[in-house]
Amino acid sequence: MNSTQGLVFDAYGTLLDVHSVATTAEELFPGRGEEISRLWRDKQIEYTRLVSLSDPNDAGSRHYQSFESLTRASLEYVLKRLGLPLHTDSIESLMHRYRRLRPFAEVKSVLTSLAQFQLPMVVLSNGSREMLKAVMANAELIDFFDRLISADEVRQFKTSPKLYALGPQALGHAAQQLLFVSSNGWDAMGAAWFGYQTCWINRAGLPSETIGLAPSRVGSDLSCVLEMVQAQRRQS
């Protein structure tokens, strides 16, 4: 395995708990909070794939909408599907909460430890520029990273190679020298296909994907990234 020269992190679901919106959803729609959160996330990812795959020649312009726009649209769809009222105040409250997602418990301490190795670290996310900046600042994570890279830059969502290519471009190293970290198995696979070393943060205890390349490492939380970097440093 190549020695890691930089770290590339997914944001939503990896650093930030997307289902922390369930608390607000439960307050607004008692008994439906977890269901709203789960369906919202599924539809959000479905919409990112739909607009990317539907663009001719992978141009990323005809159908592209920002992640924030698709997040709102997917929320409205879910409320309609569940037969819940589409009150503007409720939608705005949930969108406001999405810009204030909680980081997972171990994230700050792991990032603090990783910073001691002086490896460049970036976020590579589907998130729109302003949405990503807001949520990372609110979670007090933004200062750990050299750059927040948004899908807006190429107008394509994951698993587009155009988006994955922004990591090596930003860090000045080949993908094989970079470790891509994601809690989404499909995202880790897409990054592995592109050429990254990968660490799959399997927070949900899911089975491994049954196609594609296996991740370089699997862990239940972000501490496995620190362990991987530490092991490489001991061997070097």
Image (spheres, rainbow, N blue to C red):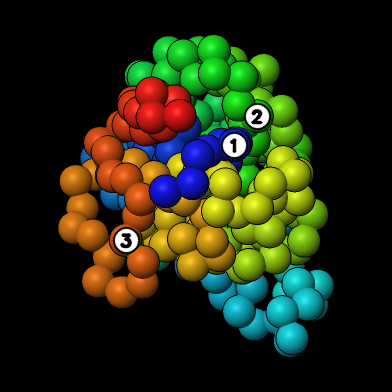
- The image position of residue 45, as x and y in percent, is 49, 61
What residue occupies the far front of the structure in this picture? Answer: 236
Q: Tell me the SS state at disc 1.
A: loop
Left or right of 213, for residue 50: right
Q: How crowded is mark 1: few (under 14 residues within 10 Å), some or many (20 or more)?
A: some
Left or right of 47, for residue 24: left
Is residue 124 at least partly visible in the picture?
yes
Q: In which quarter of the image is residue 189?
A: bottom left
Q: Tell me the SS state at disc 3.
A: loop
- In the rendered image, which quarter contains the C terminus? top left
Residue 47 in the image: above or below residue 151: below
Residue located beneath label 3 in the image: 214
Residue located beneath label 2 in the image: 120
C-alpha distance separating marks 1 and 3: 21 Å
Q: Tell me the SS state at disc 2.
A: loop
Left or right of 204, for residue 139: right
- The image position of residue 94, as x and y in percent, is 52, 37
**Residue contact between numbered discs 1 and 2, judged by CB atoms under 8 Å:** yes
Of residues 35 and 113, which is closer to you in this image?
Answer: 113
Of residues 115 and 201, which is closer to you in this image?
Answer: 115
Of residues 223 and 27, which is closer to you in this image?
Answer: 223
Q: Which mark is residue 196?
A: none
Pointer 1 or 2: first along the chain: 1
Q: Residue 5 carries which label?
A: 1
- The image position of residue 107, as x and y in percent, is 43, 22
The amino acid marked with disc number 2 is: Pro
Of residues 209 and 234, which is closer to you in this image?
Answer: 234
Pointer 1 or 3: first along the chain: 1
C-alpha distance separating marks 3 and 2: 25 Å
Is residue 41 at least partly visible in the picture?
no
The amino acid marked with disc number 3 is: Ala
C-alpha distance separating marks 1 and 2: 8 Å
